[in-house]
């Protein structure tokens, strides 16, 4: 059986598109043609999110290899929101997409194992074991050290799943911690990249990348280039494209000579394409999913032009 990163790379090659669609459904971003169908309650909001997400998945599953739901935008709607999250993940997998959950979990010991059980492994009750959310990848914050990553890695080995570990994030203040110089002269992010490369040694697949992968932002191209050299077997999830200002030519620095090695996240630019200046005159609000498809094709062509 292929490991998690090989399955992701296979989908990228199949679709010809190194893009992951972030599904971060802020209620106010959803089109009124969807929200007006449901009561203004937590349950109604969750139903609107499910309809919206499914429409985007239906319209893009043949051209986008993966989705990345950000768990916060489901948790904020309580239990109904988490049901919407679960249904979204299941639906995307049924459509053949890879599911990367952006949860940035990071704790030690039994707590880390509990998080990992929920998303990558299984929960045991007596003689029964059950996969709960059963997604393909989860994002992890490593800043408590190996202790907080090890339970996730063990489940990746056991259940053929993957991680994206925060190395250099795309937010403006990331340098306050991640760019600090150590006594060795290396930045913190460089040291973390080396750890990720080491943690992933046993989970490299046929493309020579590991299922223990990294989050490296497009908004810092110099660091992106440096980390690619530091961690040649580490696959990158690259946020920061589009609304955050990451440029295609910068993103290319995170890929290898074969055009592999990364997947680029776009959330607002895809989810809200129907509102953008580029597409608002061409698509009505009710055509929001078609606008997302048009933007996905444009983004795919833009990325492939520099890869």
Image (tube, rainbow, N blue to C red):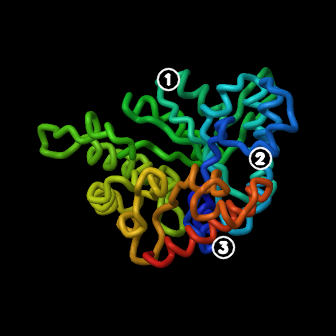
Q: Residues within 10 Å of mark 3 (few under 14, many from 20)?
A: few
Q: Are marks 3 and 2 in contact (CB under 8 Å)?
A: no
Q: Secondary structure at mark 2?
A: helix
Find residue 300 and report its horizontal and vertical position in percent.
57, 70
Q: Residue at x 67, y 64 (%)?
A: 281
Vertical side of 71 occupied by 161: above or below: below
In this picture, residue 128 sits left or right of residue 273: right
Q: Which numbered disc covers residue 52?
A: 2
Element under label 3?
helix
**How many numbered circles does the render carry?**
3
Using the numbered discs, state the Cα–Cα distance from disc 1 to disc 2 in whole angstroms.
37 Å
Residue 156 falls in image quadrant: top right
Horizontal arrangement in the rendering, residue 224 relative to residue 202 (left or right): left
Q: Of label 1 and label 2, which has the lower sequence position?
A: 2
Task: Give the x, y percent position of residue 157.
Answer: 58, 46
Residue 301 seen in this snapshot: yes
| Picture quarter with the C terminus | bottom left
| Front position among marks 1 and 3 | 3
Which residue is label 3 attached to?
14
Residue shown at 80%/23% (left/top)?
41
In space, the residues marked 3 and 2 are separated at their CA atoms by: 25 Å
Foreground residue, 36 or 215?
36
> Residue most toward the front?
281
Name the residue rendered at 67%, 68% in the picture.
294
**Disc 1 + disc 3, Cβ < 8 Å:** no
Where residue 293 sits, quadrant-wise, is: bottom right
Q: Earlier in the sequence, mark 1 or mark 3?
A: 3
The disc at residue 109 is: 1
**Which label belongs to residue 252?**
none
Q: What's the distance in space between the residues labelled 1 and 3, CA to CA?
A: 38 Å
Please identify the quadrant where the N terminus is shown.
bottom right
């Amino acid at each position: 059986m292929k490991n998690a990163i090989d399955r992701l790379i296979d989908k990228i090659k199949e679709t010809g598109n190194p893009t992951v669609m972030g599904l971060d459904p802020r209620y106010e971003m959803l089109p009124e043609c969807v929200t007006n169908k449901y009561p203004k309650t937590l349950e109604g909001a969750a139903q609107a999110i499910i309809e919206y997400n499914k429409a985007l998945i239906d319209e893009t599953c043949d051209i986008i290899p993966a989705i990345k739901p950000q768990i916060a935008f489901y948790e904020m709607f309580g239990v109904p929101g988490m049901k919407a999250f679960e249904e979204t993940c299941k639906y995307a997998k049924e459509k053949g997409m890879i599911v990367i959950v952006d949860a940035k979990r990071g704790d030690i010991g039994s707590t880390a194992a509990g998080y990992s059980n929920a998303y990558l492994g299984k929960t045991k009750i007596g003689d029964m074991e059950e996969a709960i959310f059963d997604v393909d990848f989860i994002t992890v914050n490593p800043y408590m050290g190996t202790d907080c990553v090890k339970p996730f890695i063990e489940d990746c080995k056991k259940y053929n799943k993957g991680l994206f570990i925060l190395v250099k994030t795309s937010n403006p203040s990331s340098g306050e911690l991640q760019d600090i110089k150590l006594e060795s002269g290396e930045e913190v992010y460089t040291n973390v990249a080396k750890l990720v490369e080491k943690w992933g040694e046993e989970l490299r697949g046929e493309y020579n990348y590991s299922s223990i992968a990294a989050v490296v932002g497009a908004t810092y191209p110099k660091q992106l280039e440096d980390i690619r050299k530091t961690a040649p077997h580490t696959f990158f999830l690259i946020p920061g494209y589009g609304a955050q200002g990451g440029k295609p030519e910068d993103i290319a620095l995170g890929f290898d000579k074969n055009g592999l090695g990364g997947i680029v996240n776009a959330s607002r630019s895809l989810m809200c394409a129907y509102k953008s200046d580029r597409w608002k005159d061409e698509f009505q609000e009710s055509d929001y999913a078609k606008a997302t498809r048009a933007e996905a094709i444009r983004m795919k062509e833009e990325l492939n032009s520099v890869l």
